Amino acid sequence: MRPASDAHQSRLLYELCALLLTVLRASPDDGAVARPLLPRHVTPAGVASMLLGASMALMLCGSVTFMLGFFLMPWVVGLGFLFLFVGFITNLSGIWRDIILWPSVACSASDSPKEAPSPCT
């Protein structure tokens, strides 16, 4: 059984959709008897309730979007920090490998037959 607030929200959304469909409804069916179209009079209360319903729907959708972002933002930040940490560790191991293997790289670069013998050997 749904709580009373959910039933109330569902009823409000149903009424809002019904009001919007009534306002946006096309001309009468083509098969209907042709009668002169009288201009529809929209009351100020109808416009106010339509705008109130539209603003309520936007507020509900906006608050849901905000809550999703609010709950998911720590996961996004955590994932970003994880990638940053993994990238740092990957580069750190490359830097240490270059520091440790630097003498052997320097010696292999200077081993050419045209130059004088290197002090590495």
Image (spheres, rainbow, N blue to C red):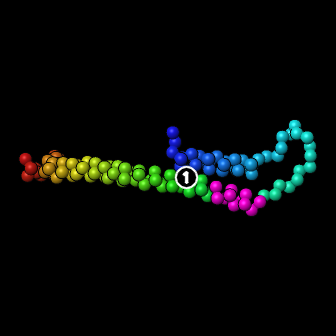
Q: How many marks?
A: 1
Which is nearer the eye, 80 or 20? Answer: 20
**What residue do we see at 35% from left, 49% from top?**
79
**Would residue 81 be seen by someone viewing this image from the given angle?**
yes
Residue 6 shown left or right of residue 25 in the figure: left
Which is nearer the eye, 108 or 48? Answer: 48
Residue 47 colored in magenta in the image: yes
Rendered location of residue 21, percent (x, y): 72, 47
Rendered location of residue 54, percent (x, y): 64, 55
Which is nearer the eye, 83 or 1? Answer: 1
Rendered location of residue 108, percent (x, y): 16, 46
Task: Say above or below: 10 vs 44.
Answer: above
Question: Which range is magenta?
Answer: 43-53
Residue 101 shown left or right of residue 26 in the figure: left
**Would residue 98 be seen by someone viewing this image from the given angle?**
no
The kind of residue tagged 1 is: Cys
Callout 1: few (<14), some (14-19), or many (20+) C-alpha neighbours within 10 Å? few
In the image, farthest residue toward the top = 31
Task: Say above or below: 2 vs 51.
Answer: above
Residue 15 colored in magenta in the image: no
Which is nearer the eye, 23 or 87? Answer: 23
Residue 39 shown left or right of residue 77 in the figure: right
**What residue do we see at 92% from left, 43% from top?**
34
Residue hosting label 1: 61
In the image, farthest residue toward the bottom = 44
What secondary structure do most residues of the magenta stretch adopt? helix
Dot 1: what SS? Answer: helix
Residue 28 shown left or right of residue 91 in the figure: right
